[in-house]
Amino acid sequence: MDYSYLNRFYTKNRIERIQALLDADVLTADKKSQLELGMHLSKDAANNMIENQLATYELPYGAALNFLINGKDYVVPMAIEEPSVIAAASSAAKTIKQAGGFTATTTDRIMIGQVALKNPPHAAETLQLLTDKEAEIIQTANQAHPSIVKRGGGAVKLEVRHIKTDELENTPEFIVLHLHIKTLEAMGANIINTMMEGIIPYVEELTQSKALMGILSNYATECLATATCRIPVEHLQKGAFSGEEVRDRIIDAYQFAYVDPYRAVTHNKGIMNGIDGIIIASGNDWRAISAGIHAYASKSGQYRSLSQWKKAENGDLLGSLTLPLPIGTVGGSISFHPAAKMTKAILHYENAAELESIIVSVGLAQNLAAIKALVTEGIQKGHMGLQSRSLAISAGAKSEEIDWLSRKLKQAENMNLATAEKLLEEYRQ
Ligand code: NDP
C-alpha cells in the first residue's frame, strides 16, 4: 500500500478519495466502480433479511486512516452517523503510527454455549454426573453440527457451574453447562444454538431434570483481543500543554473512568464510537458485541474503564485495551451484504483474528483521541467544528450552501439550529 496517495485525504472530494484508494492499492478497479456507484442492498436481499421489511436505512460509509497494526497498514471503513468519529480515530492513529504503531494480540477464538437446569434435586450429584460425561456431551454437541467439526472446529471443553440462590430476589438454583466451542471464522450464534439444543435431550435424560434453555452466551470471555501502544511524550504536546502534562492528564482521565461509573460509561462510549462503526461496516452483529463488551467492563463487579493508560519507566505513555470480540468473517449477512463485502476488500484481512486486531486497535485510538481532547482543549472545539455541517443540513442547506453555512456557523456566537436557519434565510435572500 502506498500511503502517500492518501495525504490530505479529507481535503479531497468523494470521487478523488476513491481514486486515491485505487492509486494507493487499497482498492481494485472493480471495487472502485462499486464504491463510486454506492453499495445498495438489493430489494430481494433486504426483503428476505428481516420480517415486515418496508425500506432500507442508510448511514454514511467513510474511511479512517493511519492505522499501523502489527507492522501492517490499514484503511479502516466505518459506517456511522456521528461527525468527528472518523477524524478523531485518524488523528490518534497518526500519533500512534509515528510512535511505532499498535501491537495487537488475540486469544483462541472460543465461544460459549449454555444449557441451564433449574433447581436440580441433587445439585452436587448432578454437577458431578455432568462433569463425568464431558466426552459424551462434547460428542453429542458435535454430532448436532458436524460441518463445523469437518472444518476443524466444534465443541472442545465442558465446564459445569452451580449458581446458588440469590437471597434478595429469591431465585432458584441453577446448574449451568458451559460448552466451549471453536466456531473458526464464524461468530457462531446459529452453530452454537443448534449444538445447545442438540444436547438438551441427552442432558435431560442423564440428569432426570428439565432444561430451561440452551443458547450461546454473548459474554465471550474466551475470545479476547488486546491492542497496546507506547507513545513517547514528544508526540503528545498540545497547545499550552507539554507532552508530560498531556501524558499525566490522560492517565488521570483513565483513573477517573476506572473509579467512577458515571465517567466510565461515557469513556467507554467513546471507545465504542469507532468499534460500532467498523463492526457495522463489516456486517457483524453489533448488538451482540456491544452487550459482551459492556459486561466485560463490569467484570470486577463495578462498571469501569475498558482501556488502561499508564506511565512507562522511561516516561512514555502506555495504552492498552482488551475486549471480547466474537466477530465473524463469514455467516449472517457478511458474505452477501455489498458494504460488508466492500469492507473486507478495503481491510484486506485474512481471518477473523486479524479483524479482531483491527477493531480493538480502533477502540484504543478512539479512546486516546477523546481523552486527549478532553484533558487539553476540551471536546467541543473539534466536535462542534465538524457538527456544523450536520447542523447546516438540518437547517435545510443544499450543496454549496452547506460549505458556506458551516463556515458561518463556526464563527457564530451560538452554534445552534435557530442560528443556522436564520443565517440560511439571510443567505437565500
Ligand atoms: P451462520 O448461521 O451463517 O453460520 C456460519 C456458517 O458459515 C456456518 O454454518 C458454516 O457453514 C459457514 N462457514 C463457511 N466457512 C466457515 C469457516 N471457515 N468457519 C466457520 N464457518 C464457516 O452464522 P453464525 O452461526 O456465525 O451466526 C451469526 C448470526 O446469528 C448473526 O447474523 C447474528 O445476528 C445471529 N444471531 C445472534 C444471536 C445472538 O447473538 N444472541 C442469536 C441468534 C442469531 P457450514 O454449516 O457448512 O459449516
Image: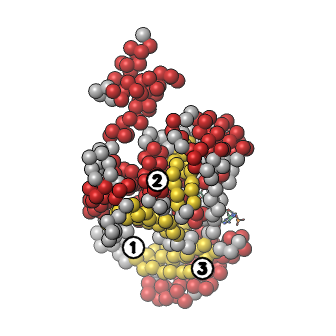
Task: Evaluate if marks 3 and 1 touch, with contact meaning CB atoms under 8 Å apart.
Answer: no
Q: Amino acid at mark 3?
A: Val
**Which residue is at a point 56% across and 38% down the rendered structure image?**
58
Q: Quadrant of residue 113?
A: bottom right
Q: How is the image coloured?
A: secondary structure
- Whether residue 252 appears in this view of the structure is yes
Q: Earlier in the sequence, mark 1 or mark 2?
A: 2
Secondary-structure class at tag 3: strand
Q: Position of residue 92 (x, y in %)?
A: 43, 52
Q: Position of residue 397 (x, y in %)?
A: 47, 23
How far apart marks 3 and 1 lie (CA) works out to 29 Å
Q: Amino acid at mark 2?
A: Ala
The residue pinned by badge 3 equals: 156
Query: Which dot, 3 or 1, sits closer to the camera?
Result: 3
Secondary-structure class at tag 2: helix
The residue pinned by badge 2 equals: 93
Residue situated in front as seen by the camera: 267 or 308: 308
Q: Determine which of the numbered discs, if any, sits on residue 172 in the image.
A: 1
- Does 164 sit left or right of 348 as displayed? left
Q: Earlier in the sequence, mark 3 or mark 1?
A: 3
Query: Which dot, 2 or 3, sits closer to the camera?
Result: 2
